[in-house]
């Protein structure tokens, strides 16, 4: 990413996200791949991370909004590949390493970096974050919304985690039982059904539901109301509530489920020569996954 000067700070030049400050003390990071339903690949992941870092380090910013271009918030992870790019093209945040290793080891390393630890890092940014969700929010899109402190949804928003259909036990950032409760999380995952915005609000996952045409304005007004509070008090309050959730066992549970997630991938690979169960994907997508795995093997030598 190239650097350009924005005020007294350096703002990266992005290709797949936009960064703006629509009102004082509020930064808005917008996923800008509407043609791909804002699917999150390596490039978007690291651009989001750089944009969030910029907002976190700007003392004038008190609140961060995460939005998505087009009719849908996010279709989740981009499983179609990263157009020839690999982890070498981006600034790695973790120290686990081993991204090019074979077997389950390499997949564990890659997903730990770009899914688990990256999302965990965003959850712990020191400033309140608001997800502005419209349309579909699927699997990895849930992770993007869940790392935010508040979720404002358009009336048409729908949420779904179809990973069980793909032979995996839920998205990598496993917040389901924390977001909607244990029994509801079981039903939602077992059935892989859609959850409406109103149902998500009733279960506690969504803070506010507003008409689609009012979504942007409502989110900005909410951000402005929060931004009027003292910056340090906002940071301390966020850390306090996150800590309460973590001492209840959230972080330990997250690590255990991530290991189960990787076990599911390994089981699928052994049985079907695919990281996912073939019943959960189309024939064309199965072929694309095989080609992606073959290309990855060639890259690792």
Image (cartoon, rainbow, N blue to C red):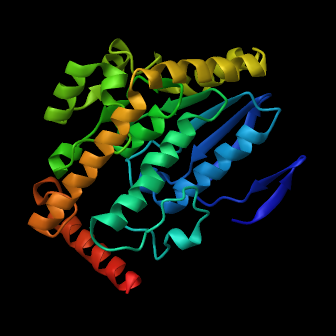
Q: Quadrant of residue 53?
A: top right
Q: Is residue 94 above or below residue 63?
A: below
Give how far across and how far down residue 103 sits, in percent. 27, 70
Give how far across and how far down residue 48 sits, in percent. 59, 49
Q: Is residue 224 left or right of residue 118?
A: right
Q: Quadrant of residue 221?
A: top right
The residue located at (42%, 53%) in the rendering is 112
Quarter of the rendering occupied by the C terminus: bottom left
Give how far across and how far down residue 194 sits, in percent. 24, 31
Q: Is residue 165 visible?
A: yes
The residue furthest right is 8
Q: Is residue 33 left or right of residue 234?
A: left
Q: Quadrant of residue 64?
A: top right
The residue located at (9%, 64%) in the rendering is 271
The residue located at (12%, 60%) in the rendering is 278
Q: Is residue 221 visible?
A: no
């Amino acid at each position: 990413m190239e650097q350009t000067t924005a005020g007294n700070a350096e703002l990266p030049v992005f290709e797949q996200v936009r960064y703006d400050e629509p009102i004082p003390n509020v930064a808005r990071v917008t996923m800008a791949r509407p043609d791909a339903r804002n699917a999150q690949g390596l490039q978007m992941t690291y651009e989001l991370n750089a944009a969030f870092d910029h907002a976190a380090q700007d003392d004038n910013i008190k609140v961060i909004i995460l939005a998505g271009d087009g009719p849908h918030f996010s279709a989740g992870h981009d499983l179609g590949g990263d157009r020839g790019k690999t982890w070498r093209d981006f600034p790695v945040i973790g120290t686990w390493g081993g991204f090019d290793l074979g077997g389950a080891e390499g997949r564990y390393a890659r997903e730990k970096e770009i899914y688990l630890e990256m999302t965990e890092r965003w959850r712990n940014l020191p400033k309140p974050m608001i997800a502005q969700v419209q349309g579909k929010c699927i699997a990895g899109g849930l992770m993007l919304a869940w790392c935010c402190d508040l979720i404002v949804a358009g009336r048409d928003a729908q949420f779904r985690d179809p990973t069980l259909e793909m032979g995996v036990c839920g998205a990598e950032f496993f917040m389901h039982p924390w977001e909607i409760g244990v029994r509801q999380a079981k039903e939602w995952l077992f059935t892989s059904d859609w959850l409406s915005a109103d149902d998500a609000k009733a279960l506690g996952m969504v803070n506010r539901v507003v008409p689609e045409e009012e979504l942007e304005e409502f989110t900005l007004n909410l951000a402005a109301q929060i931004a009027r509070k003292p910056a340090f008090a906002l940071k301390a309050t966020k850390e306090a509530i996150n800590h309460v959730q973590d001492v209840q066992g959230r972080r330990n549970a997250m690590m255990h489920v991530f290991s189960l997630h990787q076990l599911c991938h390994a089981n699928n690979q052994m049985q079907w020569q695919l990281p996912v169960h073939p019943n959960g994907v189309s024939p064309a997508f199965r072929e694309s996954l095989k080609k992606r795995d073959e290309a990855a093997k060639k890259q690792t030598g």
